[in-house]
Amino acid sequence: MSRYPRQAGRLALRAGSLTAALGVWQALTALDIDVWLRFSQFPTVTDVAGAFAERLAGPDYWTDLTASLGRIVSGFLLAAVLGVATGVLVARAPLAEDLLGPVLEVVRPIPAIALVPVAILLFPSNEQGIVFITFTAAYFPVLVSTRHAVRALTPVWEEAVRTMGGGRWRVLGSVVLPGALPGIFGGLSVGIGVSWICVISAEMISGQYGTGYRTWQDYTVVDYAGVFVGMVTIGVLGWLTSMAVELTGRRLTHWLPRTAYVSGPRPRPVRVPAAPSADPHKAEEARREHLV
């Protein structure tokens, strides 16, 4: 069986797949391929690259980038703190579950982007409304993952801490939060992705600046290369923030066993010789002697 390439080979493979995708995009758009899908309407890779370089040289791009990142950081951090706190509270306290559970379960299925009219009516500025939409998008994934992670903890751990004289806060800090961290960071990873979707949508609807606002403005003036610049920017920012959340989770859960592929031949299974079968005639003679 062939060995899987090492880290350098994997990076080269990923770069090659991205280059191949860009090459296909360039070929389809440069040749104006129209086979059901109208690639002739798309800008080429070179057009997008030229528009990207032009945007990087101007101040508006960085202003929009800073605005979107500020909204994401504000809403996501608020959702992380309140989502974890509410999830632990609902999972540990039956009274909190009875009081908050029905309200949360009714509000949770409502898409965050559908709350834009509520945010416009509720908050005095569009900026606060967009942060609220971002917070709502990330809050419920964090809440649900924390609640399930806390409820899945082994009761033996808590009983061991209480046996040694630990109180409620000791159990929370030594058992509940460390044990639930993998599940919590799973919700945070989902939440950061949903936050980007909703913050861009909110900027398109009610924003005055930001990456989503600029992308929508480029569409209204038929600047499709600018639209793709916004899309690439959103994708790169979402990827970087998701990586930051994942790396933080790995650092905080370093005690977890990690599964990794080890290059090299697989070890051959050791065959244990079967026990020799007894002679049926000798077994019958032994049985008769025992009866006698």
Image (spheres, helix red, strand yellow):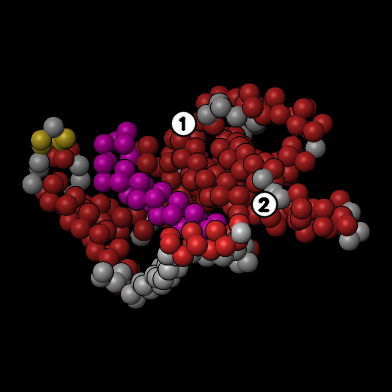
Q: Position of residue 134 (x, y in %)?
A: 56, 40
Q: Quadrant of the N terminus?
A: bottom left
Quarter of the image for residue 131 reads top right
- Residue at the (25%, 59%) spot, across then down: 17
Q: Is residue 172 magenta?
A: no
Q: Across the whole image, how many numbered discs are drawn on residues?
A: 2
The residues colored magenta run 218-247
Asked if residue 69 is positioned above or below residue 139 in the image, the reply reads below
Element assignment for label 2: helix
Asked if residue 281 is positioned above or below residue 71 in the image, the reply reads below
Q: Is residue 165 visible?
A: yes
Q: Position of residue 35 (x, y in %)?
A: 10, 35
- Residue at the (34%, 54%) spot, across then down: 55
Q: Quadrant of the C terminus?
A: bottom right
User: Which residue was labeled with disc 1?
Assistant: 205
Q: Which is more N-terminal, label 2 or label 1?
A: 2
Q: Please state if 178 lies on the left or on the right of 190 as rendered.
A: right
Identify which residue, 268 or 103, lies in the foreground: 268
Q: Is residue 229 magenta?
A: yes
User: Which residue was labeled with disc 2?
Assistant: 180
- Residue at the (65%, 31%) spot, across then down: 124
Give the residue type that dot 1 points to: Ile
Residue that lies at the very extreme toward the front in this rendered image = 292
